[in-house]
Every structure is written in C-alpha cells, then in structure tokens.
Amino acid sequence: MMKLKYSLAAAALAITSAASAQNWIEDTISTGNGYLNNVYYSLENGTAATNPADNWHIGFSAKVFSASIITNSADKGVRLYALNTDPTTFGTDLTTALVNKVDADPMSLYNSNHTWENGAFNNTDEAAYGWGDYDIASHWVLGKVVFGLITATDTFQIFIEEKQTYQVNNAPVYLFKVAQIDGSNMVEKELAIGGSTYVGKNYAYYNIETDEFLDREPLSENWDFVFSNYNDEAVNTGTSLYKVFGVINNEGLKVAKVDTADAFFDDLDYAVYNYDTVINSIGRVWKSSGPNGVVMTDSLCYFVKVANGDVWQLVFTHHTTGADTTGAGKVGLKKRKVYEEPISVKEMNAFVNNVLLAPNPAVNGNVSLLIDAKQQLGQTKITITDINGRAIRSWNTNLSAGFRQLNLDISHLNAGLYLVNVSGQGFGITKKLVIK
C-alpha cells in the first residue's frame, strides 16, 4: 500500500493546491464482458460514447492533413501486409504473394502505440506515408502499395488509390479498392468525409466483410481518451504483438505520470511535472495481475492536460477484468480539476484545425501554406522570420472558413531554418520551415 508521510511543507503545499483544485469526483465505466465495447471518456462530462469494439476493420483519418489509416488488430484480429508497389497487380491473384510475405516476415503491420498518425497502413517504408506519396501539384496523397489483409474469417487485397484533400467537393475524399486475395469480387469505394457525419471526428470506419462504413466516434472535442484493447509494442512475441486492455489518449492530450509513495495525491503540484503526448502514456500500467486478481497501482496518479488547456488529476481505483462474470470490464476512477484555463486562452484554440507547410523541406523557391480554418479568420498576417526572430518577409490576407492554400515566394531566401507565423485577431500559430 502507499506510504503516508506528512510534513509542514507538505501541509503548506496542500493548502495552496486546494485553493485552485476542485473536489474529487468518482466515476465508473463499463466495457462489458470480454471488453466487448470501446468507451470514449471525457474528464469534464464522463462517458461520451460506447460502441462495439469488434464491428470494424479499417479506420480512415477524417482530418484533411492526416494520411493515417488504422486497423483493428486487437478486437477483429486484422493482420496487414505490404505485398508490392505495383498498383497494376491489384485484382490479380495475390495468394502466393501473401503466403510468401507471411513466411518471410510473419509479423504484420500494427498501429503505433505512440501516435495516431502512424496507423498500420502507414507503418511500411514502401512510400512516404506508408500506403502512398504526397503529390505537390494537387496536395493529395496518391496510393502506391498493394496490401494483403487477413481477418478472422477471410483474406483480402486492398489498394488505397488516393486521398483527395484540395479543390474537390466534400474533402477529404478517399478512393480505394477491395477484392478477395485471388482477385475476385472487386469493389471500388469512395469515402467523402466533408459534409458527412464524420466531420469533426478523428476517423471514419469500414467493415471489409460487410462492405459497410460506420460512424463510431463522438466528436473529437467531446472525449479525452478511450478504454480499449490494443496491441502493445513493448510485448513482442516474434510473430505478433500482445493484446492488452488499457487507455488510449485522444490527439493533443498531454499526460504526466506521477508514481510517488511518499506523498498524498492531494499534495502534488501539477505544474512541476513533465508532460508528454504519447497516446498510451496512461496505457495499462495503472493495474497489474496478482494472485487475487487485478491489483491497482495505488501509488500512481496522472495529471492530464486536455485540449482546451484545463488540467485534471486522475487516479484509478478498481478494475474487474473482461472475463469477470460480475461487473465485467468495469473501471473505477476518481478525478478532479486542478487548473482551469482562462476563457480568453481557450477561445484561441477555436479558430484553426491545422496549419501545414508543404513541401517541407521546401525546394525550388516555393512553398504552400495550407490552412484548415474552423471559422472566418478575417485579416490575417503571415510573417517569415529567421531563427533569431528577425522578420524577413510578411503578407496580409483575408481568410474565410475552410481549407485554404497560399503560395509563398521564398526564392530570395537562403537554405536554412525559418519560422512562419500566422496571426490574426485572437490567434497565432508558428510553424518551422526548412529550405534546402
């Protein structure tokens, strides 16, 4: 059990912290028998959505600037292999190619435990984004790799033709093809994210066996992490990654893990710890298996900085496993808000989904500034500075909501590192630019 030590210094710190911290709130979530459900959770509002964990095979990023495509390896048993970089082979019999690939390297492609951006389809070196390459003329990602995909009941081949991101209706739009591994029963699919129920969410999902698109997630702004099975990169059997149950963070979440046996949780100062953005920074280590079942790591707590800047303190209190017949798959926790970001700062985050420079590194004297604006930005200033902060060039423009491309002339700049700042009323974003 956690050791309880106290001192006058600790008492003083407790008084200071309590002045800005809320009272502890206890909550429980349930994933069901066998962890059959994914539970999306908001520290502010509790459970945001509960959906079956095993009704999908592939997830396509709904964000304009992301090439991420993930697989459901944990709950649907998806195994993915890059077969070749010749798109003309799609639709032919690739049975032998898949058998040879599995024999040579049985470890399939998995989603990264560190970032949502590296889904299983991205984790091959065959192309810049795994499944495809960036096209500078269109700002689309064009497919290059033919994959073999094995489910628990069938085997397929799949080719992601392109992700259309600019100057197309309902962008982003995915075009992809699916067939049986022998080339039969080919279907061509179009997934238009813009204007659909997927807008404002992280992923749109596809069941390859039923040929069905699924809307599974709440809006990205409405959840902080998801209770889910996942494959742990730290436990490699040589042919697969071990499946575990734990917590996967939403994009942008920052977490400080605090393992301290020498202080009350109430005594801790959230501001002194280092925060990271690794999506399994909470993961599964808040519990462990013992002779009497699952045991909580009772000296462990987390400080969680959510997307709007608020900071929460989180402690897991109990857990019943997915195989337990009574209260299966339940997780108990307690939480409290220890810092609330001022409204004026929160409002700054409401303007822009993302800003991107492409290509970066830049070549041949030109670079495109791509802005995905949530709302009308109005008068906006774009400034390029060197690493010493000296302004080299600036532009003024009027930006409306939506996806915008601005071509910046950098032909007069020498090779090196620069900063590009985009600022307007109530917001400011800076991106690094490398010129070769």
Image (spheres, rainbow, N blue to C red):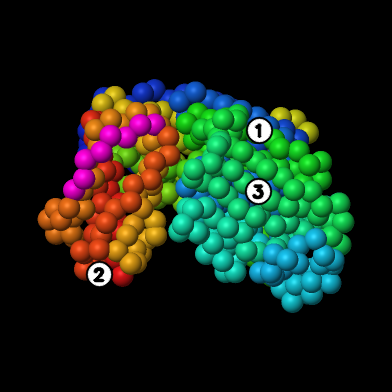
- Which mark identifies residue 415? 2
- The image quadrant of residue 348 is top left
Disc 3 and disc 2: Cα gap in Å?
37 Å
At x 39%, y 41%, the residue is: 404
Measured Cα–Cα span from mark 1 to mark 3: 18 Å
Is 399 colored magenta in this rendering? yes
**Residue pictured at 61% horizontal, 59% vertical:** 143
- Near mark 2 (Cα within 10 A), the count class, few <14, some 14-19 or many ≥20, is few
Amino acid type of the residue that numbered disc 1 sits on in the rendered structure: Asp
* Residue type at numbered disc 3: Leu
Residue 1 pos. (x, y %): 50, 43
Classified by dominant secondary structure, the portion drawn in magenta counts as strand
How many badges with numbers are in the image?
3
The residue indicated by pointer 1 is 215
Span highlighted in magenta in the image: 394-401
Mark 1 closeness class: few <14, some 14–19, many ≥20 residues within 10 Å: some
Indicate yes or no whether the magenta region holds residue 167. no
Horizontal side, residue 111 vs residue 249: left or right: right
Question: Crowding near pointer 3: few (<14 within 10 Å), some, many (20+)?
Answer: some
Q: Residue at x 29, y 64 (%)?
A: 365
118 left or right, relative to 272: right
In the rendered image, which residue does mark 3 sit on? 175
Whole-percent x, y for residue 165 in the image: 51, 46
The image quarter in which residue 30 lies: top right
Q: Is any atom of residue 281 visible in this view? A: no
Q: Is residue 237 above or below residue 54?
A: below
Identify the residue at the far left of this view. 390
